[in-house]
């Protein structure tokens, strides 16, 4: 799942997606011989789709204080971003609750890839 939030994720009218997190997920999938099928939507829609078991990973510039932490499992922060007002946000991705192997594999990949910095 992908929610529009440049520069982390960009969703185009023709179905293409781009951005820092899109590159990370594509790299993760390639490292595991998996294909990526992007499902665009609002964070709330994607969190509910993940809770139903319809999605494996959700990206969109999610932060560690995401309101969806009861519906999805959040990775450990893989990078930090300083906002224009000087606050620091810890960036995360989401996986389904209970999918610990996927969560650990994604966190390991993100640590090895050096995050989105």
Image (cartoon, helix red, strand yellow):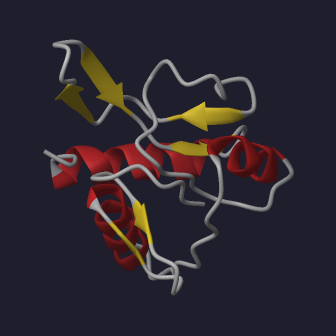
Residue 3 percent across, percent down from the top left: 54, 54
Residue 26 percent across, percent down from the top left: 37, 72
- Number of numbered labels in the structure image: 0
Q: Residue furthest right?
A: 52
In terms of depth relative to the viewer, which is nearer, 40 or 33? Answer: 40
In terms of depth relative to the viewer, which is nearer, 59 or 82? Answer: 82
Quadrant where the C terminus is found in the figure: top left
Q: Which residue is at a point 33% across and 52% down the rendered structure image? A: 6
Q: Residue furthest bottom?
A: 14
Residue 9 percent across, percent down from the top left: 38, 58
Q: Which residue is at a point 42% across and 51% down the rendered structure image? A: 106
In terms of depth relative to the viewer, which is nearer, 71 or 84? Answer: 84
Residue 17 against residue 99 in the figure, above or below:
below
Q: Which residue is at a point 40% across and 42% down the rendered structure image? A: 61
* Quarter of the image where one finds residue 44: top right
Residue 106 against residue 73 in the figure, above or below:
below
Quadrant where the N terminus is found in the figure: bottom right
Residue 56 against residue 43 in the figure, above or below:
below
Compared across the picture, whether 52 is left or right of 27 comes to right
């Amino acid at each position: 799942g992908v929610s529009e939030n440049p520069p982390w994720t960009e969703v185009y009218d023709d179905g293409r997606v781009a951005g820092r997190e899109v590159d990370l997920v594509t790299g993760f999938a390639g490292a595991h011989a998996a294909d990526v099928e992007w499902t665009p939507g609002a964070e709330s829609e994607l969190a509910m789709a993940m809770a139903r078991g319809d999605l494996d990973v959700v990206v969109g510039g999610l932060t560690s204080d995401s309101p969806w932490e009861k519906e999805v499992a959040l990775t450990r922060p893989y990078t930090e971003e300083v906002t224009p007002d000087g606050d620091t946000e810890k960036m995360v991705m989401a996986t389904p609750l209970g999918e610990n192997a996927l969560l650990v594999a994604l966190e390991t990949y993100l640590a090895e890839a050096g995050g989105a910095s």
